[in-house]
Amino acid sequence: MKPKILFMGTPEFAIPSLKILISNDYPVLGVVTQPDRPKGRGQKSVSSPVKVVAEQYNLKIFQPESVRDKEFLDTFSEISPDMVILTAFGQILPREIIEFPPMGCLNVHPSLLPKYRGAAPINRALINGEEKTGVTIMLMDEGVDSGDIILQEGTDIDPDETFDDLHNRLSQIGAGLLLNAVKDVTSGTVTRTPQDSSLITFAPRLTRETRHINWENSVKDIINLIRGLSSSPGAYSFLREKKLKIFFAVSGKMKTSGEKEPGKLGKLMESGLQVTAKDGHVYIQEVQLEGRKRMLIDDFLRGYQIFSDDVLE
């Protein structure tokens, strides 16, 4: 008999996992997602991507400000799920929820745990220049991404892959892995593997400082930062005191050492707009200047003149 499942998730990453449960006829008792938030210039209230999908399937929707509130915990007890599945929900679960379902709380986490515990595992793997990552299904405990591993699947990271590309691939891998994990838990054939504490690394939340490009860094580090933040929230620099988001760039070697100061803009080349870094050049290909649309660098430069003394700061 298939377990009754309560699903917890918020962003786009969680949607394939929710859909695969529905398409395989698992009884989803409801969806818990973050409350609607104001967004954009008009600060209009916007539903989470998971809520939009839940409405399409006529699922019950719960949006507590905190899952620790007594009102929600009482509701949770009434729902009485056999299993809770969480993927990119956005809140830490209390013991009352983790220990309640007889088949446990399963978490879909986009890294090969115990590497990259925390809020931004996909971003951090790319920023750090990792060549491989993956998805872990774990049984949750009260720690942050510290539960026993049920299943893992690794995947190579393409050298040009951006956050958007990798995010979408891992969300699909995670959905397929989740389905297998649910089957194993239901059949009683699941294997639990404790995480090796000596291998733990962390993926803390992204800050404004993290996103700000330091042109005194190496070309490789700058390119990896741009990849790891594209397209959202975006790596940025400042051009004449206006924020310039950079979504895609490629690397190039320096012809002579110490040719120009870091951040110095050069010519538009076949590879993109040349910018000097510590040990070479970064060639910018796609940007968005504050107050303008995102565009390819050729289109941007048709309406924006670059001067010889311009420096990205």
Image: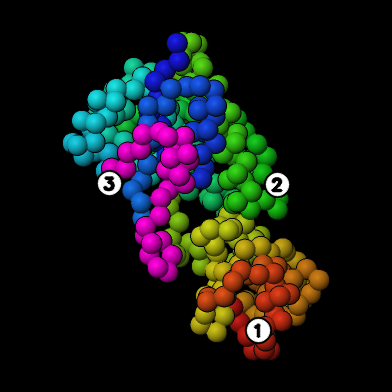
Around disc 1, counting alpha carbons within 10 Å, would you say few (fewer than 14), some (14 to 19), or many (20 or more)? few
The quadrant of the picture occupied by the C terminus is: bottom right
How did the renderer colour the structure? rainbow
Q: Is residue 162 above or below residue 97?
A: below
Identify the image quadrant of residue 61. top left
Whether pointer 1 and pointer 3 mark residues with C-beta atoms closer than 8 Å, the reply is: no
* SS of the residue under disc 3: loop
Residue 51 is covered by the magenta coloring: yes
Q: Which residue is mark 3?
A: 65
The quadrant of the picture occupied by the N terminus is: top left
Identify the image quadrant of residue 194. top left
Question: Which residue is at a point 67% across and 77% down the rendered structure image?
Answer: 300
Query: Mark 2 or mark 3: which is in front?
Result: 3
* SS of the residue under disc 2: loop
Q: Nearer the viewer, residue 235 or 71?
A: 71
**Can residue 261 be seen at all in this image of the molecule?**
no
Calculate the distance from the C-alpha at mark 1 to the C-alpha at mark 3.
44 Å
Q: Is residue 130 above or below residue 265?
A: above
Residue type marked 3? Glu
Q: Residue furthest left?
A: 70
Q: x, y (%) of residue 128?
A: 58, 51
Residue type marked 2? Asp
Question: Which region shows up in magenta?
Answer: 38-64
Q: Which residue is mark 2?
A: 158
Residue type marked 1? Tyr
Q: x, y (%) of residue 217?
A: 59, 66
Q: x, y (%) of residue 285?
A: 70, 68
1 or 3: tag closer to the N-terminus: 3
Residue 304: give its label.
1
Q: x, y (%) of residue 54?
A: 44, 38
Q: Nearer the viewer, residue 261 or 282?
A: 282
